[in-house]
Amino acid sequence: MARLSIAMCGAGLIALGVAAVASHAPVAAQAAACSNRGALDDAYCDDNRDLVADPPKEERQFRDPSALVFAYTPVEDPALYASQFKPFMDYLTQCTGKRAVYFPVTSNAAQVEAMRSGRLHIAGFSTGPTAFAVNLAGAVPFAVKGKEDGYESYKLAVIVRADSDIRQMSDLKGKRVAHTSATSNSGNLAPRAYFPDLGLVPDQDYRVIYSGGHDRSVMGVNSGDYDAAPVASDVYNRMVARGQVRGDNFRIIWESAPFPTSSFAHAHDLRPELVEKIKQCFYDFRFPEDMKRDLGGNDRFVPATYLKDWEPVRFVADKVNAPYTRAAFDVEARREAEAEARRRAAREQQQRQQQQQQPGRTQ
């Protein structure tokens, strides 16, 4: 595989991932030998029916990279996670004997395509995009952040400003409500599954505005850009704990039952001995105090499976008829790219305005 450039990001990584798909697809003989695929892409097989891609059938198809590339979900500022995960990257290097590299991705689509193309070996995928990673990229989830008593879960929380006149879900009719992205579980799919039973249909009873991330939704409600937002409670709680926003500036008007948080997954075609080593390294690691604080009080990685632990997520997707298919992924990739282009244009416009307002600057 070509060396991963740490300078690559966003749309560029998406393009590279798409270009690399054909070269990383399995040979026709393997495809013909598959007795069951389920929801998986044609590049993968699920003969044991555990809903994730089986390892390759031929020895020559296994990979044993000299360096392990890891990326964590871009639900918040990627730069934050690069710092937070550094102790684990150092440990993973020591534990596996292979250099572990953290790669900051700027979109869910870029992260999924990077694993599918073979440029990403281990990743923490957000709850909803985990299913895209499983079906389209051969990701095999094996852990979730947690504590001694089990893995971390989160709820879909609908937040409004504390000074808002919105008191209950029915008050959202006619309002501007921030959803995060089309593939997000708590930021889009779960609201579309649950809200109609509460008498509220997204896009019909209120205007949906895609913010591009849970942190952006929280900040947008805080600034008044949005009237409300369904967000992942764990992201919201971390932002309050870090002091990014004040908890007393918000009210939560509704919460869902719990979902698992981000999955940690490996590529399906890594050499079995390497997979077992990676998993053991994850399970043995204990978060240092700073990492524990930054990641919601969690102190370890807890074993989990896609078959059992992602069942509630698949239920939501089935209920809203949002299959985790290539066509749906391509639509979301375009949305993410367009949203990033809008944000970039807004930043550039803001910079130009600030430069023009500098004292002594001639027009």
Image (cartoon, rainbow, N blue to C red):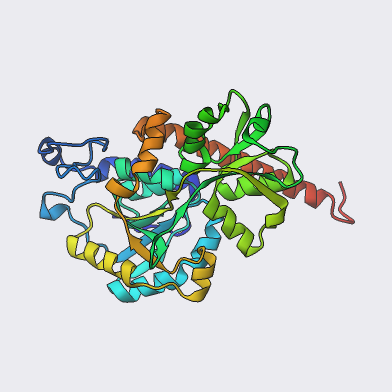
In x, y percent, where is residue 71? Answer: 42, 57
Q: How many marks?
A: 0
Left or right, residue 76 beside residue 302: right
Q: Quadrant of residue 175?
A: top right
Can residue 198 be seen at all in this image of the molecule? yes
- At horizontal 43% and vertical 58% (from top left) the residue drawn is 152
Front residue (pair 1, 59): 59
Outermost residue, right direction? 360
Outermost residue, top direction? 204
- At horizontal 23% and vertical 46% (from top left) the residue drawn is 53
Quadrant where the N terminus lies? bottom left
In x, y percent, where is residue 124? Answer: 40, 55
In x, y percent, where is residue 69? Answer: 36, 61
Residue 82 vs 10, above or below: the answer is below
In x, y percent, where is residue 198? Answer: 55, 30
- At horizontal 50% and vertical 52% (from top left) the residue drawn is 74
Front residue (pair 229, 135): 229
